Amino acid sequence: MRKPNPSKATTITSLEQLEQIVRKPARCRIEFGEQKLEVEVVRLRPCEAAVVERILKTPVPPFVAAVGNQPEHYHTEDAAYREELRRAQFTARAVTVYFGCPIYRTAMEKEKILPGDQDFQQKAQAFVESRLTDDVLAILAAAITGEAGGNVPRLVDFFSPSDSRPS
C-alpha cells in the first residue's frame, strides 16, 4: 500500500468529513514488559471533557481568614482537601478512560454502568481501576487527553493513519 505524502494537506469540505477524521480512533501504544500493545482511544468531545473538568473542580481547599500579618488564603496543604483532590483525580481519570477508550465503554455498558446513573463516577472509578495497573491507566488517560507532552508520538499514533505504520 502506498504511503500518504505527509506534506500534502487534506482539504476539508464538510463538517461531517472533519468529524469523521477527528473522531476516528487512534492507537495508544503501550510497552508492557516485552509485549507491545495497541489500544484504540478517541479524544474527548467537549461535553465529555466538561464532565471531567467538573470532577476536578469539585474539591476546594479551606479558606483561611487573615490573622495578624498573615493574608487570607486557601489552605492547599490541608490533609482533607489533599485527599479529596486525590480522589477527584482518580475519578476524573476513570471517567476519561470510560469516555475515551471504547473497550472500557463497551465493557462498562455490559455491566450497566452508564453516565446517566446517579453513582456513575464511583462505579466507573471502581470498574476502571480494578482492571489494570496504575501506569497503564495513566498512559491511556494521557493519550486520550493529549497530555503526554513530548511522549505523544511514542504513546499514541494520533498523527499517522494506521496503514502507514510499519508492522
Image (cartoon, rainbow, N blue to C red):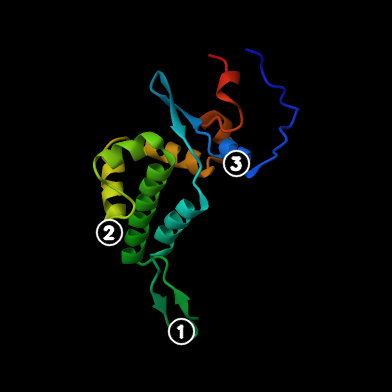
Categorize mark 2 by other alpha carbons within 10 Å: few (<14), some (14-19), many (20+). Answer: few
**Residue 90, position in %: x, y?**
35, 50
User: Which circle, 3 or 2, is nearer the viewer?
Assistant: 3
Instruction: Please state which amino acid type lies under the numbered disc 1.
Output: Ala
Residue 157: numbered disc: none
* Separation of marks 1 and 2 at Cα, in angstroms: 39 Å
Residue at x 41% of width, y 77% of height: 63
The quadrant where residue 58 appears: bottom left
Please tell me whether residue 63 is drawn above or below residue 107 in the rendered image. below
Instruction: Please state which amino acid type lies under the numbered disc 2.
Output: Gln
**Residue 144, position in %: x, y?**
48, 41
Please tell me whether residue 54 is drawn above or below residue 147 in the rendered image. below
Badge 3 marks a residue whose secondary structure is helix
Which residue carries the number 2 mark? 118
Please tell me whether residue 148 is drawn above or below residue 119 in the rendered image. above
Foreground residue among 157 and 84: 157
First of labels 3, 2 by sequence position = 3
Residue 66: numbered disc: 1
Residue 16: numbered disc: 3
**Residue 130, position in %: x, y?**
26, 40
Categorize mark 1 by other alpha carbons within 10 Å: few (<14), some (14-19), many (20+). Answer: few
Please tell me whether residue 24 is drawn above or below residue 120 in the rendered image. above
